[in-house]
Amino acid sequence: MIKECLNINISAHQVLSNGEPCILFQARKLSLRYEKQKQLDLTERAFSPQKPVDISQSVCRQDKATLLLRFGDVEDLRGLTIRLQLSNTFYESSGQWWFSVDSVSLLYNTSEEASFNASEVYAPSSSSYHCLHVSSQQRHSALLLPNTDHARRWAITFTNFQIQAFNITSGKFSPASDCATFLTPAILMGLITSLILLLVLAYALHMVIHLKHIEHDDNHKPDIYFPHNPEHPEHCCATTLFIKDYSSIVKPLTDLTSGYPPLHNNTKPNRWTDSCELAFNTIIEKLTTAPVLGFADPKLPYVLHTSASTTGLGAALYQEQEGHMRVIAYTSGGLSCSESWYPAHKLEILALKWAVAEKFSDYLYGNQFTVITGSNPLTYILTSAKLDATSYQLLAAVSAFTFKLQYQAGKLNSDGRGHMESCLMT
């Protein structure tokens, strides 16, 4: 069943299927031109309510539709008909149905046909499609592409073109998606795919950095041993656990590793003294009581203590929480053979790079923090210091971080050095 309804100044064609509207179509102007002949204006024949074009042969199905505009004889064209083929498709990328105009064909003189493929003439089924020009001419963006050599001789143009199909409510056009602004399914799929790939890349980079830190830590982390028998102190206490004053506590135990003094009467002296027993019990207590490390608060600034010597590197990360400086993490590490020959100032630069860019980068990146160092010359490296190529390379690794350097005398800056020694005296 076919009928026509009038909008203001323009007569829109409406195709009904089972009593429900399935196609709405209108245009302000419709014109044809064959090669260089005079342009043929079909606007009045197509949309005038006084002389309505025959659309009675139009059909609608669930996912396909055909709109036929039958003009009859127009000048030298006998039985002129314009046919629009439409389809309805669900795109998972956008999660909704889209209708499209797939092709536009000119049928005339019984057997003649000029067919055009429609490019980017589609919209969500909940919207109508509107475009200022739907045309085969390049000056109008050529949304209609000739499908045959015969079609290239024709030029067809719809001006102020609007159409909607398959999902029409109240017999009126839904709000229009303009051809120059709305996102097509291909664009939406590309954007979603790009976002997914970006998230995968970010996660992969995070895992690579994390695994690099784990691998670096494992290179310097010894096993933890507990002596089963005080008579065998050589099995005692290699640890990198975060115990304050570790080196001074375990000194009686580490002294046992220096070997036995000369034997008298072929008997070994009992070297497990009361101080060894006290050190052993103290370590057991430290290992079995609650830790004193604080939880990092990303809203608070950090304070980083670093220290370096020819035997290794040490660092401690702090935050002032509830009026007290709380330890967030300790770390320590060894040196390669070449690094152990660095002068003092270069060792301090190495400790800065190692602590900031490697050990504590997850805490410090994107935050402002203060670096406390026991090396006064280190406070000038970011301004007036003249450095060699290796030092500049080390500093380049921390260039992405925002921090200030503060000198503190060596006796006051014992946290980084103390933990370094505690981990290296094994």
Image (cartoon, helix red, strand yellow):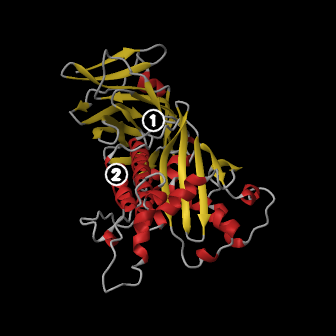
| Residue 75, disc | 1
Name the foreground residue: 80 vs 206. Answer: 206
Residue at the spot of label 2: 287
Residue 365 in view, yes or no: yes
Residue 239, image x, y percentages: 39, 62
Assign the N terminus to one quadrant of the image: top left
Distance CA(mark 2)–CA(mark 1):
102 Å
Please tell me whether residue 270 is drawn above or below residue 202 in the rendered image.
below
Q: Residue at x 59, y 75 (%)?
A: 340
Residue 251, image x, y percentages: 45, 63
Name the foreground residue: 25 vs 343. Answer: 343
Name the foreground residue: 175 vs 151. Answer: 175
Q: Quadrant of residue 418?
A: bottom right
Q: Residue at x 68, y 68 (%)?
A: 344
Label 2 is placed on what type of residue?
Leu
Q: Quadrant of residue 128?
A: top left
Label 1 crowding class (10 Å Cα cut-off): few <14, some 14-19, many 20+?
few
User: In the current view of this chain or complex, which residue is farthest to the front?
Assistant: 265
User: In the current view of this chain or complex, which residue is farthest to the bottom?
Assistant: 266
Element at badge 2? helix
Label 1 is placed on what type of residue?
Glu
Element at badge 1? loop
User: In the current view of this chain or complex, which residue is farthest to the right?
Assistant: 384
Q: Position of 4 compared to 31: left or right? A: left
